[in-house]
Image (cartoon, helix red, strand yellow):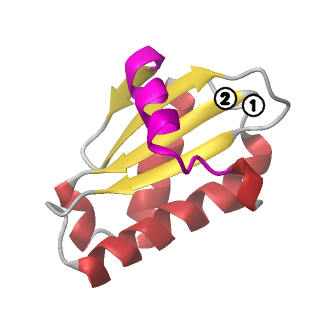
């Protein structure tokens, strides 16, 4: 995932939250909205409810790696935000990857 493919600005996240569709499972929440670009822009959010900074960073790394390894399967031209729920703090990589792929399939983003 290149640095220009990341959502960084607060206004970008807000736009996805306001205009996008959402879906959730027990570990993650996904928000998605179409963009007019030829690539996806991705954002990852982990709130303080999940744990301290070490735990939040670990969860964010696991989510990013899950997305990176499955990026080729996902349709393009979307802004996507993944939000970690508090249950993520005890989850393994396989559980987070499974939850992420489940949401992507439910949103019909698999090409």
Residue that numbered label 2 is attached to: 78
Residue that numbered label 1 is attached to: 75
Q: Answer few, some or many: residues within 10 Å of disc 2's Cα (few below 14, many 20 plus, some between 14 and 19).
A: many
Q: Quadrant of residue 54?
A: bottom left
Q: In the rendered view of the protein, which quadrant contains the N terminus? A: bottom right
Q: Which element type, helix, strand or loop, lies under badge 2?
A: strand
Query: Residue 35: percent from the left, percent from the top?
Result: 69, 23
Residue stretch in magenta: 6-20
Are dots 1 and 2 in contact, CB under 8 Å? yes
Q: Main secondary structure of the magenta part?
A: helix
Q: Residue furthest right?
A: 38
Q: Nearer the viewer, residue 101 or 32?
A: 32
Q: CA distance from mark 1 to mark 2?
A: 8 Å
Q: Which element type, helix, strand or loop, lies under badge 1?
A: loop
Q: Residue furthest bottom?
A: 54
Residue 105: say if magenta.
no
Residue 1 in view of the camera:
no
């Amino acid at each position: 995932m290149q640095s220009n493919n990341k959502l960084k600005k607060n206004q970008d996240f807000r736009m996805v939250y306001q205009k996008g569709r959402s879906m959730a499972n027990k570990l993650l929440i996904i928000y998605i909205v179409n963009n007019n670009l030829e690539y996806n822009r991705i954002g990852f959010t982990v709130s303080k409810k999940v744990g301290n900074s070490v735990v939040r960073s670990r969860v964010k790394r696991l989510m990013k790696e899950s997305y990176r390894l499955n990026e080729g399967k996902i349709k393009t031209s979307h802004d996507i935000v993944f939000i970690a729920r508090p249950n993520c703090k005890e989850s393994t990589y396989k559980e987070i990857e499974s939850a992420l792929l489940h949401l992507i399939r439910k949103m019909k983003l698999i090409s």
